[in-house]
Amino acid sequence: MIAGSHFGPFVTGYILYQYHQCHVTQPLLLEQLWEYEVDISAGQLSNILTENKEEFHAEKEEVRQTGLEVSSYIGVDDTGARHDGKNGFCTVIGNDWFAIFESTDSKSRVNFLKVLRGAACQGYAINDAALDYWKGRKCRWNGWKN
């Protein structure tokens, strides 16, 4: 049994696989489970799909960090779509070895930096590469030590 659930790893795994990998909608998945004589409510199904996913989020952060650390290049793209009458955006960051998809309600540069750096990072990072870039373009900044 999975902690906090009436269902074991087989049923939980089946639900997650059908929903995320096979794109089976919740109503259709609920109907399937009832046909298999699994005694589950719509609320229980929703909880399995949405609750207690901290381990998955932690793994996603590890993939992001490792991918960015070991990659010599990354590609980025985003797309927009409306959902429930609101604009939304999905940003993808990756290369041949990893990919991160993040859905947000903004397409701004600041939002992109948040997606790139992960949820734990806040603000901007000015590192040696940024300083070299600015100096090479003769940008004015009162923090130069020269």
Image: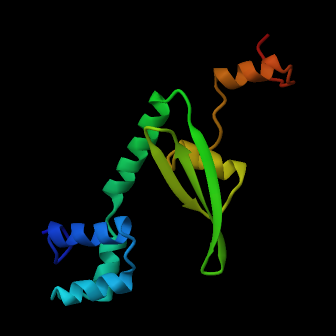
Q: Foreground residue, 51 or 141?
A: 51
Q: Is 7 located above or below residue 61 in the figure?
A: below
Q: Residue at x 37, y 86 (%)?
A: 27
Q: Residue at x 79, y 10 (%)?
A: 146
- Rendering colour mode: rainbow
Q: Position of residue 99 (x, y in %)?
A: 47, 46
Left or right, 138 with respect to 98, comes to: right
Q: Residue at x 69, y 57 (%)?
A: 107
Q: Foreground residue, 121 or 81?
A: 81
Note whether residue 121 is visible.
no
Left or right, 77 with respect to 132, comes to: left
Note whether residue 112 is visible.
yes
Residue placed farthest to the top in the image?
Answer: 146
How many marks the image carries: the answer is 0
Quadrant assignment, res 129: top right
Q: Position of residue 116 (x, y in %)?
A: 57, 44
Left or right, 81 with respect to 134, comes to: left
Q: Is 10 located above or below residue 61 in the figure?
A: below
Q: Position of residue 73 (x, y in %)?
A: 56, 31
Q: Quadrant of the N terminus?
A: bottom left
Quadrant assignment, res 98: top left
Q: Position of residue 7 (x, y in %)?
A: 16, 75
Left or right, 5 with respect to 119, comes to: left
Q: Is 3 located above or below residue 43 in the figure?
A: above
